[in-house]
Amino acid sequence: MAKLKFTKGELKRQRDSLKQFERYLPTLQLKKQQLQMKILETRRTLASRSKMLNTLVDDAGKWAGLLADESVDVKGWITPEEVTMSATNIAGARVPVFEDVFFQDVKINYYSSPFWIDSGLETMRNIVKLMAEVETIKTQIYILER
């Protein structure tokens, strides 16, 4: 602790500091509570989205072997063209917010392609979308904790 001088000027500085601390401490405590609540909410959202992602991946694993056998190249169809995000201010911290993922429009020839291609494509796009959302939520948690 710093050594205090016992003068009138030092006493005035200490009283002014005390007034400032008493004035701003409730605001800082409220900001801390808001951050803690938002972190908890974001972690719950992360757990929910991760569970949904794991369920989709498990379901897709049952028919994913079909991708290796077929001559259909779906990699270009499930690669996102654009991931849109916005930013929001949470208790003074600027965090990204996931909005949507846009994919290339696909013209599927249903006569020459396998019968499962439309549902498989939709499932894999949902997986990619959830993966992008999970990564954004992890970034939110990282920023809020800092």
Image (cartoon, grey):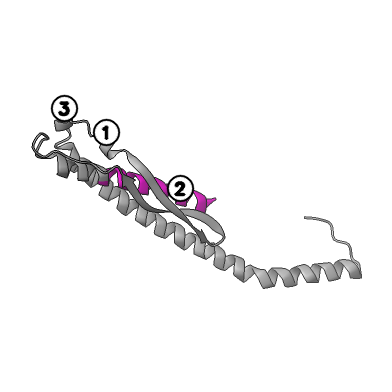
Badge 1: how crowded within 10 Å, few (<14), some, or many (20+)?
few
Q: CA distance from mark 3 to mark 1?
A: 12 Å
**Residue found at x 29% / y 42%:** 104
Q: Which residues are magenta?
A: 126-146
Residue designated by label 3: 71
Q: Nearer the viewer, mark 1 or mark 2?
A: 1
Asked whether the beta carbons under mark 1 and mark 2 sit within 8 Å of each other, the answer is no
Judge whether residue 134 is colored magenta: yes
How packed mark 2 is, by other alpha carbons closer than 10 Å (few <14, some 14-19, many 20 or more), is: some
Image coordinates for residue 27, horizontal then vertical, percent: 60, 69
75 in relation to 81, above or below: above
> Residue at the spot x=85%, y=61% of the render?
4
On the image, numbered disc 2 is attached to which residue?
Answer: 139
| Tally of marks | 3
Q: Is residue 9 left or right of residue 118?
A: right
Q: Earlier in the sequence, mark 2 or mark 3?
A: 3
Is residue 71 found left or right of 5 in the rendered image? Answer: left
Which one is nearer the viewer's eye here, 40 or 135? Answer: 135
Residue at x 79%, y 71% (from the top left corner): 15
Residues at marks 1 and 2, CA–CA distance in whole angstroms: 26 Å
Secondary structure under tag 3 reads loop
- In this rendering, the label closer to the viewer, 2 or 3: 3
Quarter of the figure that contains the N terminus: bottom right
Looking at the rendered structure, the secondary structure element under dot 1 is: helix
- Residue topped by disc 1: 75
| Residue type highlighted by circle 3 | Ser
